[in-house]
Image (cartoon, rainbow, N blue to C red):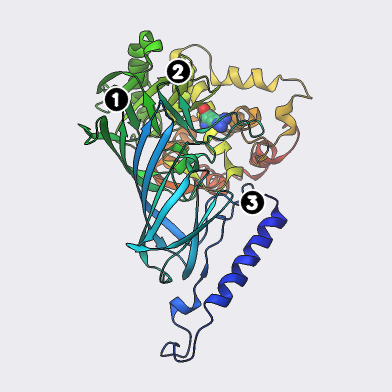
Amino acid sequence: MTRGAVALLATLNLLACGAAVEPSKGSTGSDGSPPAAARAGAGAPGIGDPHFPLDGNGGYDVAHYALEIGYVPASKHLDGEATIRATATQPLSRFNLDLHGFKVSEVTVDGAAARFSRDGDELSVTPAKPLAQGAEFAVRVAYSGEPQPVRGSSNLGTYGFIPTKDGAFVTAEPNGARTWFPANDHPADKATFDFKITVPRGVTALANGELLSRKPAAGGGTTFTWRESNPMVTYLATATLGKFRLREGKTAGGIPNLAATDPRYAGALDKLYERSGEITDHWVKVFGPYPFGSTGGVIDDFSAGYALENQTKPMYGGFEPDESIIAHELAHQWFGNSVSIKRWKDLWLNEGFATYAEWLWAEHRGDSTAEQRFRTALNRAADDAIWSYPPGDTRPDDLFHESVYLRGAMTLHALRQEIGDDTFFKLLRTWAAEHEHGNATTDQFTALAERLSGKQLGSLFDAWLFQPRRPAV
Ligand code: ARG
Ligand code: ZN
Protein backbone atom coordinates (compact mmCIF):
# COMPACT_ATOMS: atom_id res chain seq x y z
CA MET A 1 0.00 0.00 0.00
CA THR A 2 1.20 3.54 -0.70
CA ARG A 3 2.20 6.03 1.95
CA GLY A 4 -0.81 8.20 1.11
CA ALA A 5 -3.11 5.26 1.69
CA VAL A 6 -1.44 4.57 5.02
CA ALA A 7 -1.90 8.14 6.16
CA LEU A 8 -5.54 7.93 5.11
CA LEU A 9 -5.98 4.67 7.01
CA ALA A 10 -4.47 6.23 10.13
CA THR A 11 -6.82 9.20 9.81
CA LEU A 12 -9.82 6.93 9.44
CA ASN A 13 -8.74 5.04 12.55
CA LEU A 14 -8.54 8.25 14.51
CA LEU A 15 -11.95 9.40 13.30
CA ALA A 16 -13.53 6.05 13.99
CA CYS A 17 -12.37 5.78 17.56
CA GLY A 18 -12.62 9.49 18.30
CA ALA A 19 -16.37 9.06 18.01
CA ALA A 20 -16.42 5.90 20.08
CA VAL A 21 -14.45 7.14 23.08
CA GLU A 22 -15.85 10.64 23.60
CA PRO A 23 -15.69 10.82 27.41
CA SER A 24 -19.16 11.04 28.89
CA LYS A 25 -20.00 13.43 31.72
CA GLY A 26 -18.95 12.19 35.12
CA SER A 27 -16.31 9.84 33.72
CA THR A 28 -13.42 12.22 34.29
CA GLY A 29 -10.54 11.33 36.62
CA SER A 30 -10.04 13.05 39.97
CA ASP A 31 -7.77 15.67 38.38
CA GLY A 32 -10.40 16.50 35.79
CA SER A 33 -8.70 14.64 32.94
CA PRO A 34 -10.50 11.75 31.29
CA PRO A 35 -9.51 8.35 32.72
CA ALA A 36 -7.06 6.30 30.66
CA ALA A 37 -9.68 4.11 29.07
CA ALA A 38 -11.69 7.12 27.91
CA ARG A 39 -8.66 8.59 26.14
CA ALA A 40 -7.93 5.30 24.41
CA GLY A 41 -7.35 5.38 20.67
CA ALA A 42 -6.50 2.86 18.01
CA GLY A 43 -3.00 1.43 17.77
CA ALA A 44 -1.28 2.34 14.51
CA PRO A 45 -1.49 -0.25 11.70
CA GLY A 46 2.31 -0.16 11.30
CA ILE A 47 5.20 -0.10 13.77
CA GLY A 48 6.76 2.92 12.05
CA ASP A 49 9.25 1.50 9.55
CA PRO A 50 9.14 3.77 6.49
CA HIS A 51 10.32 0.89 4.26
CA PHE A 52 7.36 -1.31 5.21
CA PRO A 53 4.69 1.05 6.58
CA LEU A 54 2.14 -1.64 7.46
CA ASP A 55 4.56 -4.18 8.98
CA GLY A 56 4.19 -4.62 12.71
CA ASN A 57 1.73 -2.46 14.60
CA GLY A 58 1.71 0.37 17.10
CA GLY A 59 0.45 0.64 20.67
CA TYR A 60 1.72 -2.55 22.27
CA ASP A 61 4.77 -4.67 22.83
CA VAL A 62 4.59 -8.47 22.60
CA ALA A 63 6.30 -10.52 25.34
CA HIS A 64 5.31 -14.04 24.28
CA TYR A 65 3.64 -16.05 21.54
CA ALA A 66 2.09 -19.41 22.43
CA LEU A 67 1.28 -21.08 19.12
CA GLU A 68 -0.82 -24.22 18.79
CA ILE A 69 -0.73 -25.47 15.26
CA GLY A 70 -2.30 -28.51 13.67
CA TYR A 71 -1.25 -29.24 10.10
CA VAL A 72 -2.14 -31.97 7.63
CA PRO A 73 0.23 -32.04 4.64
CA ALA A 74 -2.18 -34.03 2.44
CA SER A 75 -4.93 -31.38 2.64
CA LYS A 76 -2.66 -28.41 3.41
CA HIS A 77 -5.08 -27.53 6.18
CA LEU A 78 -3.78 -25.56 9.14
CA ASP A 79 -5.69 -25.11 12.39
CA GLY A 80 -4.16 -22.46 14.58
CA GLU A 81 -4.68 -20.98 17.98
CA ALA A 82 -2.31 -18.20 18.97
CA THR A 83 -2.19 -16.69 22.44
CA ILE A 84 -0.15 -13.53 22.51
CA ARG A 85 0.87 -11.83 25.75
CA ALA A 86 1.60 -8.15 25.34
CA THR A 87 1.75 -4.81 27.16
CA ALA A 88 -0.17 -1.78 25.94
CA THR A 89 2.23 1.13 25.37
CA GLN A 90 -0.67 3.59 25.02
CA PRO A 91 -4.33 3.53 25.98
CA LEU A 92 -5.92 1.27 23.35
CA SER A 93 -9.52 1.13 22.19
CA ARG A 94 -8.33 -1.27 19.53
CA PHE A 95 -5.12 -2.61 18.01
CA ASN A 96 -3.94 -4.58 15.00
CA LEU A 97 -2.13 -7.81 14.35
CA ASP A 98 -0.65 -8.86 11.01
CA LEU A 99 -2.21 -11.99 9.49
CA HIS A 100 -2.15 -13.12 5.87
CA GLY A 101 -5.05 -15.26 4.65
CA PHE A 102 -6.95 -17.78 6.85
CA LYS A 103 -10.40 -17.54 8.27
CA VAL A 104 -10.47 -16.11 11.78
CA SER A 105 -13.21 -17.74 13.85
CA GLU A 106 -12.72 -16.14 17.24
CA VAL A 107 -10.70 -13.49 19.04
CA THR A 108 -10.65 -12.94 22.78
CA VAL A 109 -8.79 -10.42 24.91
CA ASP A 110 -8.19 -11.53 28.50
CA GLY A 111 -10.79 -14.24 27.99
CA ALA A 112 -13.58 -11.93 26.81
CA ALA A 113 -14.87 -12.05 23.24
CA ALA A 114 -13.48 -9.21 21.14
CA ARG A 115 -14.78 -7.72 17.90
CA PHE A 116 -12.47 -8.05 14.95
CA SER A 117 -12.24 -7.09 11.28
CA ARG A 118 -9.86 -7.80 8.41
CA ASP A 119 -8.38 -5.46 5.84
CA GLY A 120 -5.59 -6.93 3.73
CA ASP A 121 -3.00 -8.28 6.17
CA GLU A 122 -4.35 -6.17 9.03
CA LEU A 123 -6.44 -7.93 11.67
CA SER A 124 -8.08 -5.26 13.83
CA VAL A 125 -9.11 -6.26 17.33
CA THR A 126 -11.52 -4.26 19.50
CA PRO A 127 -11.46 -5.57 23.08
CA ALA A 128 -14.72 -5.47 25.05
CA LYS A 129 -13.07 -2.91 27.35
CA PRO A 130 -10.31 -0.49 26.27
CA LEU A 131 -6.82 -1.29 27.55
CA ALA A 132 -5.04 1.21 29.78
CA GLN A 133 -1.49 2.23 29.02
CA GLY A 134 0.84 -0.26 30.71
CA ALA A 135 -1.83 -2.96 30.92
CA GLU A 136 -0.66 -6.49 30.30
CA PHE A 137 -3.11 -8.44 28.22
CA ALA A 138 -3.50 -11.74 26.39
CA VAL A 139 -5.09 -11.87 22.97
CA ARG A 140 -6.12 -15.26 21.63
CA VAL A 141 -6.86 -15.78 17.95
CA ALA A 142 -8.39 -18.95 16.51
CA TYR A 143 -7.85 -19.31 12.76
CA SER A 144 -7.74 -21.94 10.05
CA GLY A 145 -7.31 -22.52 6.35
CA GLU A 146 -4.68 -23.21 3.74
CA PRO A 147 -1.52 -21.15 4.36
CA GLN A 148 -0.70 -18.76 1.52
CA PRO A 149 3.03 -18.09 1.37
CA VAL A 150 4.19 -14.82 -0.15
CA ARG A 151 5.14 -15.59 -3.75
CA GLY A 152 7.50 -13.76 -6.06
CA SER A 153 7.02 -10.34 -4.55
CA SER A 154 9.74 -8.31 -6.31
CA ASN A 155 12.98 -10.25 -5.84
CA LEU A 156 12.31 -11.92 -2.52
CA GLY A 157 11.27 -15.27 -3.97
CA THR A 158 8.72 -17.35 -2.08
CA TYR A 159 8.72 -17.09 1.70
CA GLY A 160 6.56 -17.75 4.73
CA PHE A 161 4.83 -21.05 5.45
CA ILE A 162 5.44 -22.98 2.23
CA PRO A 163 3.55 -26.28 1.94
CA THR A 164 5.69 -29.16 0.62
CA LYS A 165 4.75 -32.76 -0.30
CA ASP A 166 5.57 -34.11 3.15
CA GLY A 167 5.03 -31.02 5.29
CA ALA A 168 6.11 -27.41 5.14
CA PHE A 169 9.23 -25.32 4.63
CA VAL A 170 8.98 -22.28 6.89
CA THR A 171 11.33 -19.33 6.35
CA ALA A 172 9.75 -15.94 6.80
CA GLU A 173 12.24 -13.13 6.28
CA PRO A 174 11.33 -10.33 5.88
CA ASN A 175 7.62 -10.39 6.76
CA GLY A 176 6.17 -13.86 6.28
CA ALA A 177 5.45 -14.83 9.89
CA ARG A 178 1.91 -13.60 9.23
CA THR A 179 1.47 -16.46 6.73
CA TRP A 180 1.20 -18.89 9.63
CA PHE A 181 0.37 -16.95 12.80
CA PRO A 182 -1.06 -13.55 13.81
CA ALA A 183 1.96 -11.43 14.70
CA ASN A 184 3.42 -8.05 15.37
CA ASP A 185 5.35 -8.86 12.26
CA HIS A 186 8.44 -6.67 12.40
CA PRO A 187 11.91 -7.29 13.89
CA ALA A 188 11.58 -4.34 16.28
CA ASP A 189 9.26 -6.37 18.53
CA LYS A 190 11.04 -9.48 19.83
CA ALA A 191 9.32 -12.06 22.01
CA THR A 192 9.73 -15.57 23.39
CA PHE A 193 7.85 -18.47 21.77
CA ASP A 194 6.15 -21.72 22.70
CA PHE A 195 5.10 -24.07 19.91
CA LYS A 196 2.70 -26.98 20.17
CA ILE A 197 2.53 -28.59 16.76
CA THR A 198 0.38 -31.58 15.87
CA VAL A 199 1.12 -33.47 12.68
CA PRO A 200 0.24 -36.89 11.22
CA ARG A 201 2.30 -39.87 12.35
CA GLY A 202 5.67 -40.11 10.68
CA VAL A 203 5.94 -36.35 10.25
CA THR A 204 8.49 -34.45 12.36
CA ALA A 205 7.92 -30.86 13.48
CA LEU A 206 11.03 -28.71 13.88
CA ALA A 207 10.53 -25.38 15.61
CA ASN A 208 12.97 -23.00 17.26
CA GLY A 209 14.68 -23.60 20.57
CA GLU A 210 14.55 -26.95 22.28
CA LEU A 211 12.16 -29.88 22.18
CA LEU A 212 10.22 -30.24 25.45
CA SER A 213 8.13 -33.24 24.51
CA ARG A 214 6.95 -35.45 21.69
CA LYS A 215 3.72 -37.29 22.40
CA PRO A 216 0.99 -39.19 20.60
CA ALA A 217 -1.88 -36.76 19.97
CA ALA A 218 -5.40 -37.47 21.23
CA GLY A 219 -6.93 -37.67 17.76
CA GLY A 220 -3.96 -39.57 16.24
CA GLY A 221 -0.70 -38.12 15.03
CA THR A 222 2.07 -36.62 17.11
CA THR A 223 2.32 -33.42 19.11
CA PHE A 224 5.72 -31.74 19.30
CA THR A 225 6.29 -29.09 21.97
CA TRP A 226 9.18 -26.69 21.38
CA ARG A 227 10.26 -23.68 23.38
CA GLU A 228 12.40 -20.72 22.39
CA SER A 229 13.05 -19.04 25.71
CA ASN A 230 15.20 -16.25 24.31
CA PRO A 231 13.65 -13.27 22.54
CA MET A 232 13.19 -13.83 18.81
CA VAL A 233 12.07 -11.70 15.89
CA THR A 234 9.00 -12.98 14.08
CA TYR A 235 10.74 -13.72 10.76
CA LEU A 236 13.02 -16.26 12.47
CA ALA A 237 10.18 -18.38 13.82
CA THR A 238 9.78 -21.74 12.09
CA ALA A 239 7.64 -24.84 12.21
CA THR A 240 9.31 -26.85 9.52
CA LEU A 241 7.45 -30.09 8.94
CA GLY A 242 8.21 -33.27 7.08
CA LYS A 243 10.04 -36.56 7.06
CA PHE A 244 13.46 -35.93 8.57
CA ARG A 245 16.58 -37.84 9.60
CA LEU A 246 17.90 -36.40 12.84
CA ARG A 247 21.23 -36.36 14.58
CA GLU A 248 21.41 -34.95 18.08
CA GLY A 249 24.17 -34.37 20.56
CA LYS A 250 26.46 -31.62 21.77
CA THR A 251 29.24 -29.62 20.20
CA ALA A 252 32.76 -30.15 21.54
CA GLY A 253 32.19 -26.92 23.48
CA GLY A 254 29.04 -28.36 25.10
CA ILE A 255 26.26 -26.63 23.13
CA PRO A 256 23.26 -28.86 22.28
CA ASN A 257 23.33 -29.51 18.52
CA LEU A 258 20.55 -30.82 16.30
CA ALA A 259 20.89 -31.48 12.59
CA ALA A 260 17.99 -32.61 10.44
CA THR A 261 17.81 -33.52 6.77
CA ASP A 262 15.09 -34.53 4.39
CA PRO A 263 15.70 -38.22 3.48
CA ARG A 264 16.89 -37.04 0.05
CA TYR A 265 19.85 -35.37 1.80
CA ALA A 266 20.47 -38.18 4.29
CA GLY A 267 24.07 -38.42 3.06
CA ALA A 268 24.69 -34.83 4.19
CA LEU A 269 23.41 -35.29 7.76
CA ASP A 270 26.70 -36.11 9.48
CA LYS A 271 28.57 -33.36 7.71
CA LEU A 272 25.87 -30.80 8.56
CA TYR A 273 25.93 -31.90 12.20
CA GLU A 274 29.71 -31.81 12.50
CA ARG A 275 30.36 -28.58 10.60
CA SER A 276 27.54 -26.77 12.44
CA GLY A 277 29.00 -27.82 15.79
CA GLU A 278 32.56 -26.96 14.86
CA ILE A 279 31.65 -23.56 13.43
CA THR A 280 29.38 -22.64 16.36
CA ASP A 281 32.24 -23.40 18.76
CA HIS A 282 34.61 -21.31 16.66
CA TRP A 283 32.27 -18.31 16.62
CA VAL A 284 32.04 -18.49 20.41
CA LYS A 285 35.79 -17.81 20.45
CA VAL A 286 35.52 -14.93 18.01
CA PHE A 287 32.14 -13.30 18.88
CA GLY A 288 31.59 -14.30 22.51
CA PRO A 289 29.16 -16.63 24.34
CA TYR A 290 26.55 -18.42 22.22
CA PRO A 291 23.32 -16.45 22.75
CA PHE A 292 20.85 -19.37 22.55
CA GLY A 293 20.13 -22.77 24.07
CA SER A 294 21.06 -24.88 21.04
CA THR A 295 22.54 -24.83 17.55
CA GLY A 296 22.17 -26.92 14.43
CA GLY A 297 20.68 -26.82 10.96
CA VAL A 298 17.99 -28.22 8.69
CA ILE A 299 18.22 -29.26 5.03
CA ASP A 300 14.77 -29.58 3.51
CA ASP A 301 13.73 -30.71 0.07
CA PHE A 302 12.46 -27.37 -1.21
CA SER A 303 14.49 -25.22 -3.58
CA ALA A 304 13.96 -21.85 -2.00
CA GLY A 305 17.04 -20.39 -3.65
CA TYR A 306 18.28 -19.14 -0.31
CA ALA A 307 19.15 -20.18 3.21
CA LEU A 308 17.69 -18.56 6.32
CA GLU A 309 19.22 -18.19 9.75
CA ASN A 310 16.11 -19.38 11.67
CA GLN A 311 16.94 -18.98 15.35
CA THR A 312 18.84 -22.06 16.63
CA LYS A 313 18.00 -23.90 13.35
CA PRO A 314 19.30 -22.36 10.15
CA MET A 315 17.43 -23.67 7.16
CA TYR A 316 18.98 -24.71 3.87
CA GLY A 317 16.49 -24.88 1.03
CA GLY A 318 17.12 -27.77 -1.30
CA PHE A 319 20.92 -27.86 -1.31
CA GLU A 320 23.84 -29.17 0.71
CA PRO A 321 25.41 -26.14 2.33
CA ASP A 322 29.16 -25.66 2.12
CA GLU A 323 31.17 -24.45 5.12
CA SER A 324 30.95 -20.89 3.97
CA ILE A 325 27.15 -20.78 4.07
CA ILE A 326 27.04 -22.61 7.40
CA ALA A 327 29.53 -20.05 8.75
CA HIS A 328 27.25 -17.28 7.42
CA GLU A 329 23.99 -18.60 8.91
CA LEU A 330 25.59 -19.41 12.26
CA ALA A 331 27.22 -15.96 12.49
CA HIS A 332 23.67 -14.59 12.15
CA GLN A 333 22.84 -16.20 15.50
CA TRP A 334 24.90 -13.36 17.03
CA PHE A 335 24.34 -10.74 14.33
CA GLY A 336 20.70 -10.52 13.30
CA ASN A 337 19.16 -13.00 15.73
CA SER A 338 20.55 -11.95 19.11
CA VAL A 339 21.43 -8.38 18.07
CA SER A 340 18.51 -7.56 15.77
CA ILE A 341 17.75 -4.62 13.56
CA LYS A 342 15.15 -2.00 14.46
CA ARG A 343 14.54 -0.89 10.87
CA TRP A 344 15.05 -2.68 7.58
CA LYS A 345 17.34 0.01 6.26
CA ASP A 346 19.98 -1.27 8.70
CA LEU A 347 19.98 -4.79 7.22
CA TRP A 348 23.74 -4.59 6.55
CA LEU A 349 24.13 -5.08 10.33
CA ASN A 350 22.90 -8.62 9.64
CA GLU A 351 24.13 -9.44 6.15
CA GLY A 352 27.38 -7.47 6.09
CA PHE A 353 28.42 -9.11 9.36
CA ALA A 354 27.43 -12.63 8.26
CA THR A 355 29.26 -12.17 4.95
CA TYR A 356 32.32 -10.91 6.79
CA ALA A 357 32.08 -14.04 8.94
CA GLU A 358 32.46 -16.10 5.73
CA TRP A 359 35.74 -14.25 5.12
CA LEU A 360 36.82 -14.85 8.71
CA TRP A 361 36.05 -18.54 8.37
CA ALA A 362 38.12 -18.79 5.17
CA GLU A 363 40.92 -16.93 6.95
CA HIS A 364 40.68 -19.35 9.90
CA ARG A 365 40.86 -22.32 7.52
CA GLY A 366 43.85 -20.84 5.75
CA ASP A 367 42.00 -20.67 2.41
CA SER A 368 42.09 -16.96 1.70
CA THR A 369 42.50 -13.89 3.85
CA ALA A 370 39.81 -11.29 4.41
CA GLU A 371 42.23 -8.83 2.84
CA GLN A 372 42.28 -10.91 -0.36
CA ARG A 373 38.48 -11.10 -0.47
CA PHE A 374 38.30 -7.35 0.13
CA ARG A 375 40.78 -6.65 -2.70
CA THR A 376 38.92 -8.90 -5.12
CA ALA A 377 35.66 -7.08 -4.42
CA LEU A 378 37.36 -3.71 -4.67
CA ASN A 379 38.50 -4.63 -8.17
CA ARG A 380 34.94 -4.85 -9.41
CA ALA A 381 34.27 -2.60 -12.38
CA ALA A 382 33.35 1.02 -11.78
CA ASP A 383 29.81 0.38 -13.03
CA ASP A 384 29.23 -2.66 -10.77
CA ALA A 385 25.89 -2.42 -8.97
CA ILE A 386 27.48 -2.58 -5.49
CA TRP A 387 28.96 0.90 -6.03
CA SER A 388 25.66 2.59 -6.86
CA TYR A 389 23.71 0.90 -4.05
CA PRO A 390 24.71 2.25 -0.61
CA PRO A 391 24.37 -0.71 1.78
CA GLY A 392 23.53 1.49 4.78
CA ASP A 393 20.19 2.44 3.31
CA THR A 394 18.51 -0.61 1.78
CA ARG A 395 15.86 -0.22 -0.87
CA PRO A 396 12.60 -1.89 0.12
CA ASP A 397 12.16 -3.12 -3.47
CA ASP A 398 15.64 -4.68 -3.42
CA LEU A 399 16.26 -5.48 0.22
CA PHE A 400 18.73 -8.34 -0.21
CA HIS A 401 20.84 -6.65 -2.88
CA GLU A 402 24.38 -7.98 -3.16
CA SER A 403 25.71 -4.65 -1.89
CA VAL A 404 24.07 -5.19 1.51
CA TYR A 405 26.10 -8.40 1.81
CA LEU A 406 29.34 -7.67 0.01
CA ARG A 407 29.81 -3.93 0.44
CA GLY A 408 28.51 -4.42 3.98
CA ALA A 409 31.35 -6.88 4.60
CA MET A 410 33.82 -4.53 2.92
CA THR A 411 32.69 -1.80 5.32
CA LEU A 412 33.76 -4.00 8.22
CA HIS A 413 37.07 -4.78 6.58
CA ALA A 414 37.79 -1.11 5.91
CA LEU A 415 36.99 -0.49 9.57
CA ARG A 416 39.31 -3.31 10.67
CA GLN A 417 42.14 -1.78 8.65
CA GLU A 418 41.49 1.61 10.24
CA ILE A 419 41.23 0.53 13.91
CA GLY A 420 43.42 -2.59 13.95
CA ASP A 421 42.67 -6.22 14.77
CA ASP A 422 42.58 -5.93 18.56
CA THR A 423 40.04 -3.12 18.64
CA PHE A 424 38.07 -4.59 15.74
CA PHE A 425 37.49 -7.98 17.37
CA LYS A 426 36.82 -6.33 20.71
CA LEU A 427 34.22 -4.24 18.90
CA LEU A 428 32.47 -7.32 17.49
CA ARG A 429 32.34 -8.95 20.93
CA THR A 430 31.21 -5.75 22.67
CA TRP A 431 28.50 -5.20 20.05
CA ALA A 432 27.20 -8.74 20.59
CA ALA A 433 27.37 -8.40 24.40
CA GLU A 434 25.87 -4.92 24.78
CA HIS A 435 22.88 -5.66 22.56
CA GLU A 436 22.43 -9.34 23.33
CA HIS A 437 18.75 -10.30 22.77
CA GLY A 438 17.97 -6.70 21.82
CA ASN A 439 17.66 -4.36 18.85
CA ALA A 440 20.23 -1.90 17.59
CA THR A 441 20.91 0.64 14.84
CA THR A 442 23.76 1.64 12.53
CA ASP A 443 24.25 4.85 14.53
CA GLN A 444 24.78 2.81 17.68
CA PHE A 445 27.36 0.67 15.90
CA THR A 446 29.33 3.61 14.55
CA ALA A 447 29.21 5.30 17.97
CA LEU A 448 30.57 2.15 19.63
CA ALA A 449 33.32 1.87 17.02
CA GLU A 450 34.37 5.46 17.74
CA ARG A 451 34.20 4.93 21.50
CA LEU A 452 36.37 1.78 21.46
CA SER A 453 38.90 3.07 18.92
CA GLY A 454 39.03 6.68 20.08
CA LYS A 455 38.92 7.67 16.38
CA GLN A 456 36.59 9.82 14.30
CA LEU A 457 35.09 7.35 11.85
CA GLY A 458 32.31 9.44 10.35
CA SER A 459 33.83 9.80 6.90
CA LEU A 460 34.78 6.10 6.69
CA PHE A 461 31.24 4.97 7.46
CA ASP A 462 29.75 7.65 5.24
CA ALA A 463 31.83 6.60 2.23
CA TRP A 464 31.21 2.87 2.72
CA LEU A 465 27.58 2.85 3.83
CA PHE A 466 25.90 5.90 2.39
CA GLN A 467 27.53 7.13 -0.84
CA PRO A 468 26.38 5.86 -4.24
CA ARG A 469 29.95 5.45 -5.51
CA ARG A 470 33.06 3.38 -4.92
CA PRO A 471 34.90 4.61 -1.82
CA ALA A 472 38.44 5.84 -2.39
CA VAL A 473 40.91 3.44 -0.76
N1 ARG B 1 18.90 -13.78 5.54
C1 ARG B 1 19.03 -14.77 4.49
C2 ARG B 1 20.52 -15.02 4.30
O1 ARG B 1 21.29 -14.11 4.28
C3 ARG B 1 18.38 -14.34 3.22
C4 ARG B 1 16.88 -14.34 3.24
C5 ARG B 1 16.28 -14.00 1.94
N2 ARG B 1 14.84 -13.95 2.03
C6 ARG B 1 14.06 -14.01 0.96
N3 ARG B 1 12.75 -13.97 1.14
N4 ARG B 1 14.56 -14.16 -0.22
O2 ARG B 1 20.96 -16.12 4.18
ZN1 ZN C 1 22.51 -13.72 5.70
Label total for image: 3
Disc 3 to disc 2, C-alpha distance: 35 Å
Distance from mark 3 CB to nearest ligand 1 atom below 8 Å: no
Kindly tell me whether residue 352 is visible in this rendering: no
Kindly tell me whether residue 313 is visible in this rendering: yes
Q: Nearer the viewer, residue 22 or 431?
A: 22
Q: Is residue 226 above or below residue 105?
A: above
Quick check: marks 1 and 3 in contact, CB under 8 Å?
Answer: no
300 left or right of 384?
left
| Mark 2 Cα shell of 10 Å, populated few (<14), some (14-19), many (≥20) | many
Q: Measuring from the top left, give residue 386's x and y in whole percent.
A: 70, 28
Secondary element type, mark 3: loop
Q: Nearer the viewer, residue 112 or 226?
A: 112
> Disc 3 marks which residue?
50
Q: Measuring from the top left, give residue 130's x and y in whole percent.
A: 43, 71
Residue at x 59% of width, y 70% of height:
16
Quick check: marks 3 and 2 in contact, CB under 8 Å?
Answer: no
123 left or right of 392?
left
Q: Measuring from the top left, give residue 172's x and y in whole percent.
A: 49, 36
> Disc 1 marks which residue?
257
> Disc 2 marks which residue?
301
Q: Measuring from the top left, give residue 471's x and y in whole percent.
A: 72, 32
Give the amino acid type for the residue marked by disc 2 in the picture. Asp
Disc 1 to disc 3, C-alpha distance: 38 Å
Q: Specify which label sits upstream in the sequence, 3 or 2.
A: 3
